[in-house]
Amino acid sequence: MFRFGRFAQSLRRYRVLAIESSCDDSAVCLINRVENEPPILEDHLKLTMESAKDGGIIPIDALAHHLEKIAVVAQDVLNRNHRPKIDLVCATQGPGMFSSLAAGLQVGKGLAVAWNVPFLGVHHMLGHLLTPRFFPNGPKYPFLSLLISGGHTMLVFSKSITDHKVLANTIDNAAGNALDKCARHLGLEGNMLGKVLDEFTKSGDTAPLPAGLEFPLPLEKSHNGNIKTVAFSFAHFSSLIPREAKKHKFDPVAEQPEAFRRSLGIKIQAAVFDHIVRKVDLALKHLIASKELEPDQEIDFVCSGGVAANSVLRQKIQTLNSPLRLKMHFTPLQWCTDNALMIGWAGIEMYESGFRPDLEVIPVAKWPLDEFGS
Ligand code: KG4
Ligand code: ZN
């Protein structure tokens, strides 16, 4: 996909304008990069499409949102920073919604052409993975990353910017997608339903749940068996609440008392995150068994992506009884969900690793991380 070149990164000090538009956020940022110094985020602006009433993100509406907003967001960021000189433009190339990606890429390319500066298309999940390296004392290669968002759930072992091995992936939908569906079944409303569910479960009374109401974890047979591949699965969680409501006669769920719905939400969150933690634990054991890592070895561990903002998940991951000594790097809350900082920073890492700028890049809707850079 990318070609390395001897592209001369002669700039010791440069400013990046980055655009993120893979889903429903039109985001733009400015990062000032001075070699051997911590990068400075000069500005960041994000406009998220209003989709609470639609029950999900409709691609054509997301496209209209980006067509309307990205140029305006870029203009606002540039104007309020006194139109600084830009030396590199980056935009998300994929994975994501093709049309949303195209809208951001084209604005980015247009600006790069007008300013006669290099342009780089950036892998969205690489952005989530590298975000903690923007901040002081970030992870160093090789490191592990648990990336959990609305579209992806995976555990990745990264040895360099172009060497990523996906140790575990979801076989159906993503954790964020399942949590969003559960939140909707519980009668919650909002744009970012996983976050709404997180807040709902933290505040207020709870009530007893029916006896015998159990949320079994998926893929447990393979967990105990001897199979080499480790996988996540969330489809089972997406439909769990209506299924159990019929069985235990609390249908319609959305009309149940708030305290009861809160208890259900707590239980489902715990089940989703227990499933993730069990699979991470298994994947780490495989890594040791295959001699990639030594038992008790210290290794950096990133937790990033929208769902990584969840307090229950953070607590469960932190207390994971791992065969390795995990040095945790949680992406700061504000930068867990989609943003332009992650794209600008990943673009900087690509640029400084010798990725060749390219105006011909086109959106890539599905783009496995282990194919990045090959
Ligand atoms: O990374 P992201 O912004 O977009 C994708 O790349 O998919 O992740 C969005 C997902 C949504 O499913 C949203 O509900 C979920 O992250 N999310 C959360 C929390 N904040 C956002 N899920 C659980 N707890 C949160 N605090
Ligand atoms: Zn994302």
Image (tube, grey):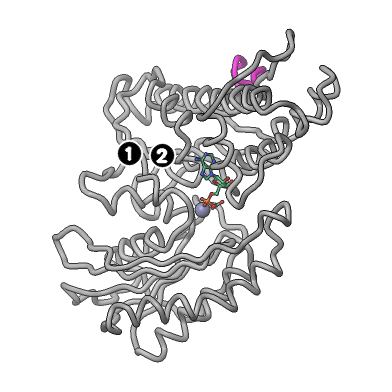
Question: Residue 5's spot in the image, x, y percent?
Answer: 33, 73
Q: Which residue is mark 1?
A: 329
Chain part drawn in magenta: 220-228
Q: Residue at x 28, y 63 (%)?
A: 41
Asked whether 94 or 23 is in front, the reply is 23
Q: Earlier in the sequence, mark 2 or mark 1?
A: 2
| Residue 54 on the magenta segment | no
Badge 1: how crowded within 10 Å, few (<14), some, or many (20+)? Answer: many
Left-right relation of 258 to 34 = right
Q: Is residue 218 above or below residue 161?
A: above
Marks 2 and 1 close (CB-CB < 8 Å): yes
Q: Is residue 326 above or below residue 173?
A: above
Identify the element where label 2 is drawn. strand
Left-right relation of 295 to 212 = left
| Residue 224 on the magenta segment | yes
Asked whether 271 or 250 is in front, the reply is 250
Q: Tell me if residue 361 can be seen.
A: no
Question: Residue 216's spot in the image, x, y percent?
Answer: 68, 18
Q: Which residue is mark 2?
A: 303
Identity, as a three-letter code, of the amino acid under mark 1: His
Identify the element where label 1 is drawn. strand
